[in-house]
Amino acid sequence: MLAPKTKRYILKILPFGIITGVFYVVYALVEHGILGDHPIYPSTKNPYNFSIWVPTIVSFVIGLLIGLFEVRFLSKTFLKSSFTKKIIFKTLIYLLVIMAATVTIAVVNNTIEFGVSPLSSRVWNGVYRFFSNFAFWSIISYYTVGLTTCLFYTEISDNVGQNVLLNFFTGKYHHPVEEERVFLFLDMKSSTTIAEQLGHITYFKLLRDYYSDLSEAIITFGGEIYQYVGDEIVVTWQLKPNQKHTESVACFFAMKAALNAKSNSYIAKYGLAPTFKAGIHLGKVTTGEIGKIKKDIVFTGDVLNTTARIQGLCNEYNVPLLLSKKLVDTLHLKASYEVFELGETELRGRDEKITLYSI
C-alpha cells in the first residue's frame, strides 16, 4: 500500500496530466473535424497528419511534469500569496514551459515528417512559420485555459480538502451512508488567555502558523481535516478492514513533536509556544452531502459529541490526551503503546458512564 503522503502527492499531480491530455484530445478532434483529410495546415502550409495517441501521451507526460514541479516546488514559493496572484503568476510561468514544450513537439514532428535532421533549416523554417502564425497563439490560448483549469482544481482542492472535492466529483456521499470512523478533537490550551495577550490580529497569525505546523503530521498519517472551529481542529479517519488504524494516536504524537520543534520560533515571534490537548474516540456516523446554497459533506452521530466531551476532560485529568475504552480495545493500542486506565466518568448529555485512558 502507498503511504498516505505519497498517495496525496500522486492525487495532486495526476489531474495535471489528465486535464492536459483531455484538452489535447478535444483540440485534436475539433481540428480534425475542420481539416478532415486536408494534407496541410491552410494558414502555415505545414504538413497536417491527424495523430492522437502519441501527442496525447506527450501532453499527459508534460502535464505530469508540470504537476510534479507544482507540488514539489512552485506551490511552496507562492504558499502565502493570494488565490488570484497564485493563478496569474503560476499560469505565466507554466505558459513559458508550454511554449518551450510546443517548440520541442514542433521540431520533432517536422523532423519526422520531412525525414531530415532536427538542425535542418527546413525543420526550423516550418517551426518559424508555425510560431509566427495566429494558429500557434490560438493553441497557446487554448492550453492556457487548460493550465488555468489545472491550477483552479489544485487551489480549490487545497481550500475545501482533497478528499472532499474527490467525494463531490464521484458522488460518494450524494446519498447518506453509514461509516465507522475515528475522530480526533484537538484544542489549543489557554487559547482565550493567549488571544487577550496577543490581540485578535496577532492571535489569528499565530493560529495560521499553528495549523500549518500541524498539517504535515495529518498528511503523513492519512487524516482528513473535517473542521476548523476557532482554535479547535477535528481530524477523522475511516475505519477499513484489515488495517491497524493506530494512525490517529501516531498523528497526535507527531503533531506534538512538530510544535516542540518550532517552540523557539513561536517564542521569538509571539512570546509564547502553543500547546494542545486532545480526545480520540470512534464510532458509527452517517455521512452525506448537505446544503443548497453551500454544499458540504458532514458527519452526524453521537461519536462526535462524545469525542468533544472526552477532549474537554483533559484539564480535569491533567493529561494532554484522553482515549475512550472503545478506541483502545478496537485498535488494540495496548499492543503498541503503554496505556493507563483513568477510571469511569460521566459525560454531559450521556446516561451511561465511559472508561477513559491516557497513553
Image (cartoon, rainbow, N blue to C red):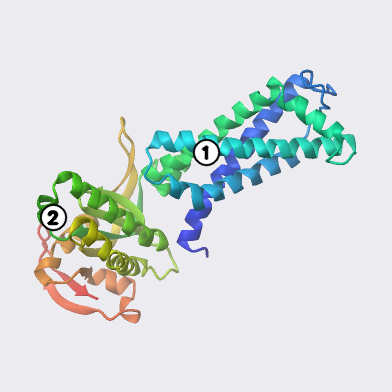
Q: Amino acid at mark 2?
A: Ile
In this view, the residue in front, 234 or 5, is 5
Disc 2 packing (10 Å; few <14; some 14–19; many ≥20): some
Q: How many marks?
A: 2
Residue at (32, 65) in percent of width and height: 258
Q: Residue 106 shows which numbered tag?
A: none
State whether residue 180 appears in this view: no
User: What residue is pinned by disc 1?
Assistant: 150
- Extreme right residue here? 115
| Mark 1 or 2, closer to the camera | 2
- Expressed as whole percent of the image width and height from the top left, the position of residue 213 reads 32, 58
Q: Is residue 312 above or below residue 94?
A: below
In this view, the residue in front, 5 or 283, is 5
Q: Earlier in the sequence, mark 1 or mark 2?
A: 1
Give the side of residue 55 with respect to residue 163, left or right: right
In this view, the residue in front, 225 or 230, is 230
Q: Is residue 327 above or below residue 142?
A: below
Q: Quadrant of residue 342?
A: bottom left
- Expressed as whole percent of the image width and height from the top left, the position of residue 65 reads 60, 48
Residue at (32, 71) in percent of width and height: 330
Q: Amino acid at mark 1?
A: Cys
Q: Is residue 256 above or below residue 168?
A: below
- What element does badge 1 sit on? helix
The quadrant of the rendering that contains the C terminus is bottom left
- Expressed as whole percent of the image width and height from the top left, the position of residue 50 reads 79, 31
User: What residue is pinned by disc 2?
Assistant: 194
State whether residue 17 appears in this view: yes
- Expressed as whole percent of the image width and height from the top left, the position of residue 66 reads 58, 45
Contact flag, marks 1 and 2 (Cβ < 8 Å):
no
Spatial CA distance of label 1 from label 2 is: 40 Å
Give the side of residue 303 with respect to residue 22, left or right: left
Q: Quadrant of residue 257?
A: bottom left
